[in-house]
Image (tube, rainbow, N blue to C red):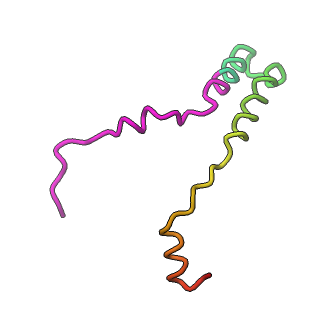
Amino acid sequence: MGKPKDRLYVNVKKLKQNNLACMAEMMNALTCLKDNNFTTEKCGREITQVNTCTTAQGKKNNPVTINYHLQRLAKGRF
C-alpha cells in the first residue's frame, strides 16, 4: 500500500489566511444576543450587519481553467 508517514505536516499558510470573513460582526451579534437574553428584537442592528457582510462575501466564482476547456473539447461540447 505504501509507506506510512513518519510525520504529519500542517500547512501553516492555510491557517494564517483571512478565511474568517465577518467574524467580528458575528461575535458582536452573539455578544448582543447573550447580553439581552437571546431576544432578537434588541439586536436587530448587529444581525443586519452580519447579514450584509455575508451577502457581500457571496460565492466567489473560480476562474475557468485550461483543464475545464480541454475536458469540454474532449467531450465534443463547443
Q: Residue at x 56, y 86 (%)?
A: 76
Q: Please tell me which residue lies in front, 35 or 14.
A: 14
Q: Residue at x 47, y 35 (%)?
A: 17
Q: Please tell me which residue lies in front, 73 or 22.
A: 73
Report x, y in % for residue 7.
20, 42
Q: Is residue 2 magenta?
A: yes
Q: Which residues are magenta?
A: 1-27
Quarter of the picture holding the N terminus: bottom left
Q: Quadrant of residue 56?
A: top right
Q: In the image as oriented, which residue stretches furthest toward the front?
A: 66
Q: Residue at x 74, y 22 (%)?
A: 38
Q: Is residue 26 magenta?
A: yes
Q: Is residue 16 above or below residue 74?
A: above
- Decide if residue 71 is on the left or right side of residue 34: left
- Decide if residue 47 is on the left or right side of residue 30: right
Report x, y in % for residue 16.
44, 32
Q: Main secondary structure of the magenta part?
A: loop
- Decide if residue 66 is on the left or right side of residue 33: left
Q: Quadrant of residue 31?
A: top right
Report x, y in % for residue 25.
67, 25
